[in-house]
Image (tube, grey):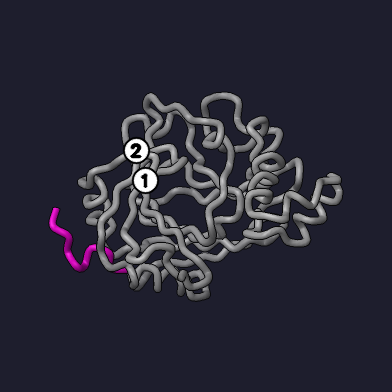
Amino acid sequence: MPLSPDTFTINPHCRVSVNHVGLGQHKVVLVDDFYQYPDTVLQLALELPYTDQFEIVGNFPGVRASVNVNTDHIVQAISDFWGMRLYSFFHPQPVVFQGITTQHYRLNIGQRQPHIDQDITAMVYLNPAESCMGGTGLYRHLPTALERVPPAPDHTIRDLAERLELSDDFFNSAEGYDHFQNSMIFNPLFAKRENAYINDGNAYWQLIFLMQMHPNRLVIFDGRCFHSQHIQSDQYTHAFRVNQVFYLSQHPRP
């Protein structure tokens, strides 16, 4: 379909709620009725060519497509709802859509437990009401009681390392810090054993908040908090879960 300049118009009457979640009181912003013309946005998303190439999707368990349009007004709106100026990770920032299905799916270990993003994550759920199920969960890592991983080791991480009698070598380089995270937090032993999303948690991960999927709902949260798709195996077997995603930063990108 031809891309109208009005496609991504923000609804001036959307409804905003701010939540503070978990022991860390992490901010989660929910914006309902975000787009003025959500059906047009969804129709555009469904007509794009999608790919599952690793260079595009990374470890995301689905497919992605993008369209190059000016997204400055969307990022500005997200910034206003979040309460501070946010910046795109990419210049220009395309509109990125992603889709997931559970038909014939096979999840790897990393997809069977929560993950983190680089900074602030914003998503718009685009499915119509009849195919809106589940959502996005935020989690506490029970072995360490962590709910978030800071970009660099802070006092919480260093206190944890001291209790565990870990070497300072973990924190002397970015590679060492990654190794700490992969061994102590995202250890494969902590993942869901069966072929399923972590959903309501297990012995190692506790669900602390569910951002429920509603049509045309924008969710904004700290991507450094542990999060995952909340999708049951009998959901999205005949229809894609479709959303729009933005990866944003609290600091200007070079």
Q: What is the spatial separation of the Cα atoms under label 1 and label 2, in whole angstroms?
A: 7 Å
Q: Quadrant of residue 68?
A: bottom left
Q: Quadrant of residue 188?
A: top right
Q: Is residue 182 left or right of residue 120?
A: right
Q: Is residue 39 above or below residue 81?
A: above
Per the image, label 2 sits on a secondary structure element best described as loop
**Could you say where residue 32 lies in the image, as x and y percent from the top left?**
42, 61
CA neighbours of label 1 inside 10 A, class few (<14), some (14 to 19), many (20+): some
Which residue was labeled with disc 1?
56
Query: Which amino acid lies under the numbered mark 1 shown in the image of this protein?
Result: Ile
Q: Is residue 12 above or below residue 28?
A: below
- Label ID, residue 235: none
Which residue is found at the position 37% from the left and 61% from the top?
Answer: 33
**Could you say where residue 66 lies in the image, as x and y percent from the top left?**
29, 52
In depth, the one of 152 and 29 nearer the eye is 152
Query: Which amino acid lies under the numbered mark 2 shown in the image of this protein?
Result: Asp
Q: Which residues are magenta?
A: 1-10
Which residue is found at the position 43% from the left and 55% from the top?
Answer: 123
In depth, the one of 105 and 179 nearer the eye is 179
CA neighbours of label 2 inside 10 A, class few (<14), some (14 to 19), many (20+): some
CB atoms of marks 1 and 2 within 8 Å: yes
Q: Is residue 2 left or right of residue 39?
A: left
Residue 129: tell me if it is visible: no
Residue 195: tell me if it is visible: yes
- Label ID, residue 52: 2
User: Residue 119 lies in magenta, yes or no?
Assistant: no
Q: What predominant SS class does the magenta segment belong to? A: loop
Q: Quadrant of residue 180?
A: top right
Per the image, label 1 sits on a secondary structure element best described as helix
